[in-house]
């Protein structure tokens, strides 16, 4: 963002589509759920722009696609809806 150019980074730990990404207060990005490899994911991962890497994060209680993820004032992320 500071250079106004796109950069290639490492791949996510899971191939996913129909997931959500949420910008966290720390500047990191949380990706949750989605669909990949013929199934829905209950996994999440966090991208750290300072390292350019994705790292596994907490699992969802249920696999989700087409859901929403909203950052709350507390800094926690509410994941709801979808399939």
Image (cartoon, grey):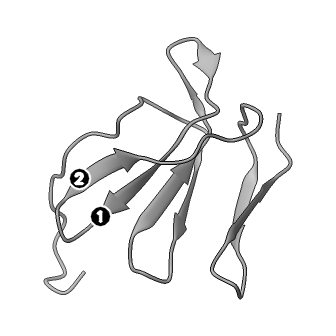
Q: Of 31 and 61, which appears nearest the observer?
A: 61
Which residue, given by chain and number where applicable, does mark 2 sit on?
A: 53
- Other-residue count near label 1 (Cα within 10 Å), few / some / many at <14 / 14–19 / ≥20: some
Residue farthest to the top, as pictured = 38
How many marks do you count on the picture?
A: 2
Position of 14 relative to 37 (above/below):
below
Point 64% across, 33% down: residue = 42
Point 34% across, 40% down: residue = 12
Split into 4 quadrants, where in the image is the N terminus? bottom left
Name which quarter of the figure residue 64 lies in. top right
Q: Which mark is residue 48?
A: 1
Cα gap from disc 1 to disc 2, whole angstroms: 6 Å
* Element type where label 1 sits in the image: strand
Q: Return the x and y of residue 41 as percentages of the image width and height.
A: 61, 29
Point 86% across, 48% down: residue = 81
Position of 22 relative to 66 (above/below):
below
Q: Earlier in the sequence, mark 1 or mark 2?
A: 1
Point 19% across, 87% down: residue = 2
Q: Are marks 1 and 2 in contact (CB under 8 Å)?
A: yes
């Amino acid at each position: 963002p500071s250079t106004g150019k796109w950069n290639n980074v490492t791949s996510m730990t899971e191939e996913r589509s129909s997931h959500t990404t949420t910008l966290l207060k720390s500047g990191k990005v949380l990706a949750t759920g989605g669909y990949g490899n013929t199934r829905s994911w209950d996994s999440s991962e966090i991208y750290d722009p300072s390292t350019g890497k994705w790292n596994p994060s907490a699992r969802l209680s249920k696999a989700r696609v087409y859901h929403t993820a909203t950052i709350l004032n507390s800094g926690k992320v509410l994941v709801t809806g979808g399939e």
